């Protein structure tokens, strides 16, 4: 949903010069509301062509566009490439899906069908989201220019390897419990853990000055460690 | 001196165009599907939350269903129904240097075609305002009845719906900074009369770098 905003305002100005979605091509004079006096007319023609394409697009196009964006981000976790534009177009659908999947898998089924793993589900859900928000806030405190939602998006998408290791865990539990299975599973868990951390720090540490990289990476490490711990200690 | 704009909600046949266009302009609800979905996800989230005990005893199933409905509602109101029903839009844009900015825009009204019909605007805003209030009530009822496992869901619901409400209010506010005045005039318009054309203008968004990240 990110669009290029033609803004040449300096950081200090209070006037972000938004896009004017003037679909009605009439009355240019509509813009001239000189109440405040600091009004400047933005570069309309250039913006308008770009803008029209999404303002009037059909709902189906919107849905497909967003779905493709989510898919691309998942691919990016699996095959990381230096792609700034992809990361700038953030969304939180991926983290939501991953969090719900993880929480569903981490439930404990109990004998009593009334309490069907409810507390564990809510617990995992809260830990993941609260942890992600806190870690992001920490990164933001260290580096002010970082966008909150973008970091949250990056952290959330990197839960994918952990979800995969949880899946493997479930498969292993379904199969026979032998030492080989256990070794494979431990190996997978460690690899996925390292992958998540590496993928996140590639993004987050870039933005920090060198002497603060550890300060930024440590909470991320802790966050993924806690999730990993829940996976490791999972017994149905 | 502020210029007077044509009252865009008058059904004045200025163009001699086709009948379809005329019918479109005169229709009370131009986007029936969008209007339906605007309310559908919100209301079904609330209904599911309230009635989940009757349908199934599964906490998880109910939680996930309500959460999905809330997410779909957030997405559809933000990306589709706001654009179609009232011509407002807001999003977050991240610059090359990593700074995030929130952008709010409103479609200008034209003499020939109003941005929103009265019915649609009313449905849109009422839906947008009432549902977060209901979720706030749920918050207190959950808190005091100590059903704390539902608290996460209620908080998620409140934040998603309040985010949409806030975003659209900022779109609507435009240059006005006195939010009290805007709210008052808004409520009176919704209840008593049609929206005035002034509200659909988009003056400078001074001072709206509120969510600068």
Image (tube, grey):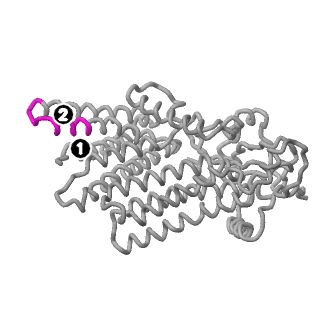
Residue drawn where x is 65% and y is 61% of the image: B123
Percent position (x, y) of residue B180? 68, 69
Residue A65, quarter of the rendered image: top right
Reply yes or no: does residue A17 show up in magenta: no
Q: Which of the chains bears the disc numbered 1?
A: A
Residue B56, quarter of the rendered image: bottom left
Q: Nearer the viewer, residue B171 or B76?
A: B76
Q: Main secondary structure of the magenta part?
A: helix
Percent position (x, y) of residue B54? 36, 65
In the rendered view, does B89 fall on the left or right side of A121?
right
Q: Nearer the viewer, residue B169 or B150?
A: B150
In the rendered view, does A227 fall on the left or right side of B155?
left
Q: Which mark is residue A22?
A: none
- The residue wearing badge 1 is A231
- The residue wearing badge 2 is A185
Percent position (x, y) of residue A226? 27, 47
Circle 1 crowding by C-alpha within 10 Å: few under 14, some 14–19, many from 20: many
Reply yes or no: does residue A174 show up in magenta: yes
Percent position (x, y) of residue A122? 32, 56
Quadrant into which the N terminus of chain A falls: top right
Residue drawn where x is 70% and y is 58% of the image: B173
Residue at the extreme bottom of the image, as rendered: B144
Residue drawn where x is 38% and y is 28% of the image: A78
Read off the magenta span.
Answer: A166-180
Q: Is residue A80 above or below residue A15?
A: above
């Amino acid at each position: 949903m990110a669009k290029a905003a033609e803004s040449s305002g300096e950081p200090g100005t209070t006037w972000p010069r938004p896009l004017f979605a003037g679909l009605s091509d009439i009355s240019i004079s509509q813009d001239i509301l000189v109440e405040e006096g600091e009004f400047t007319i933005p570069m309309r023609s250039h913006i308008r062509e770009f803008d029209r394409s999404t303002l009037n697009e059909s709902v189906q196009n919107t849905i497909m566009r967003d779905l493709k964006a989510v898919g691309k981000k998942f691919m990016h976790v699996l095959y990381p490439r230096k792609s700034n534009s992809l990361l700038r177009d953030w969304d939180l659908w991926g983290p939501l899906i991953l969090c719900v999947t993880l929480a569903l898998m981490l439930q404990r089924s109990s004998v009593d069908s009334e309490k069907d793993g409810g507390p564990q589900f809510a617990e995992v859900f809260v830990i993941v989201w609260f942890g992600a928000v806190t870690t992001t806030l920490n990164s933001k405190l260290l580096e002010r220019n970082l966008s909150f939602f973008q970091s949250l998006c990056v952290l959330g998408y990197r839960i994918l390897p952990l979800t995969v290791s949880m899946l493997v865990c479930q498969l292993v539990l379904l199969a026979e419990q032998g030492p080989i299975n256990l070794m494979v599973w431990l190996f997978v868990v460690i690899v996925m853990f390292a992958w998540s951390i590496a993928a996140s720090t590639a993004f987050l540490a870039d933005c920090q000055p060198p002497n603060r990289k550890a300060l930024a990476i440590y909470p991320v490490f802790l966050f993924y460690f806690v999730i990993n711990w829940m996976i490791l200690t999972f017994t149905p | 001196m502020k210029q007077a704009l044509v009252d865009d909600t008058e059904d004045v046949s200025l163009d001699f165009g086709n009948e379809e266009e005329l019918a479109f302009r005169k229709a009370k609800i131009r986007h029936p599907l969008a209007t339906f979905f605007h309310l559908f996800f919100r209301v079904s989230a609330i209904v599911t939350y309230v009635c989940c005990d009757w349908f199934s005893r599964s906490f998880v199933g109910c939680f996930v269903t309500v959460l999905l409905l809330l997410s779909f509602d957030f997405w559809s109101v933000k990306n589709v129904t706001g654009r179609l029903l009232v011509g407002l839009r807001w999003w977050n844009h991240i610059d090359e240097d990593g700074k995030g900015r929130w952008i709010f825009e409103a479609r200008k009204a034209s003499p020939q075609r109003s941005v929103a019909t009265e019915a649609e605007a009313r449905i849109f805003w009422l839906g947008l305002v009432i549902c977060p209030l209901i979720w706030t009530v749920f918050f207190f009822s959950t808190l005091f009845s100590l059903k704390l496992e539902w608290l996460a869901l209620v908080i998620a619901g409140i934040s998603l719906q309040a985010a949409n409400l806030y975003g659209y209010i900022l779109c609507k506010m435009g240059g006005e900074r006195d939010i009290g005045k805007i709210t008052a005039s808004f409520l009176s318009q919704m209840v008593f009369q049609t929206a005035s054309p002034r509200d659909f203008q988009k003056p400078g968004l001074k001072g709206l770098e509120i969510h600068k990240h």
